[in-house]
Amino acid sequence: MRGIGARTFGVIFLFGVNARAEAAATEPGFRTQVTDCPEEIASRLPAVVKLEIDVLMRERGPTRVPPDSIAFRCEEDSAHIEVTMGGTSRISNVDLRALSSEHRARALGLAAAELVHSISSQARAAEGAPPPPPTGPSSSEGRDRAPLPAPRRSSPRPVLLVGGLAELLGKPAALLFGGRLGLSYPLGRVVAPAMSVDGALGSIRTSSAEVMIQTATAAGHIYFGTTTGRVRWEVGPGAGIGWVHLVGKPAAGSGLVGDTVAAMWGGPELRARIAYFTSNDPDSSGASGFARVRSPALALELGAGFIALPVRGLLDGSERVYSVEGPWASVCAEVGLGL
């Protein structure tokens, strides 16, 4: 019987030692330091902290890593906690005044576990972040890198043009002065349709009479151009049609009677324009240079056309005093502004 009892005691002893060793191996391996804390906290805190950290590590799964150390320091009404883990430290303060004495150790243990969880979460986020792009250029990296998206462009703006006009019109050629109001709507970097309205007046003296001339003309053109630096070059065909009013004033002693003529005139016209931008702001829309962001431009425009719808003035049914026919030419100094 004694032999059987001795063998039973030995088996129980070995089982207990093995279980204790397994339990020690599963305990989190970190240092817990308690300084200047009351006895009811200091006596319970190490066990409570190990329990909370062990629960936290079990919840985190196979990637669990224990902290290096946890230090507690108590003052009059608060406790200072510092957790060190993987070279990173986190600090927290817990107010003890609102806690009963039996709950203070548990509250400090939970606060320490929260600091450990915060450090672990930050470490996992850093490990999962993609590596930063290389700073040095290389041919292989350049081929693999996706091209940058093109900058977004706004819609082209209409452009208002205002200027002073001078033109040679009719036979014999009369010099007229007036003004021009134009509106252009760019469709891109090259093409820009435009509409304009001219008004001009002048006079011409012949051997037998003086003729007063008034014109009002509307025209449409399609410009094609390019921009070099601050200069925009454009040229485009079009046509104009308008109304002309002629008033004849016979010379004294000629025996002629003055009269008036009002009729429509018009024909095809070619215009060329050069514009200089006073600001070097880039064209945000990528359209014709006049569509820049409210950037004013100074322009000079030349025009030449042929009158296909003439207006003729006659004397005695045979002699021509003045007529609106043949070629005409114009020059206009303008100011352009993107709307």
Image: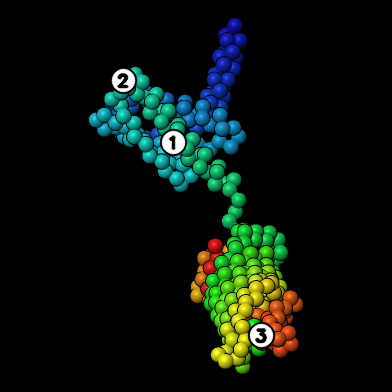
Which label's residue is closer to the chain start, 1 or 2?
Answer: 2
Q: What x and y, as percent, mark residue 165?
A: 56, 78
What secondary structure is marked by label 2?
Answer: helix
**CB under 8 Å between discs 1 and 2:** no
* Residue position marked by numbered label 2 in the rendering: 101
Q: Identify which residue is drawn at 55% across, 36% down.
A: 64
Circle 2 Cα neighbour tier, 10 Å, few/some/many (<14 / 14–19 / ≥20): few
Q: What x and y, as percent, mark residue 182?
A: 59, 69
Dot 1 amino acid type: Leu
Nearest the eye: 63 or 135: 135
Q: Identify which residue is drawn at 57% across, 89% down.
A: 251
What secondary structure is marked by label 3?
Answer: strand
Q: CA distance from mark 1 to mark 2?
A: 22 Å
* Residue position marked by numbered label 3 in the rendering: 322
Which label's residue is closer to the chain start, 1 or 3?
Answer: 1
Q: Is residue 291 visible?
A: no
* Residue position marked by numbered label 1 in the rendering: 115
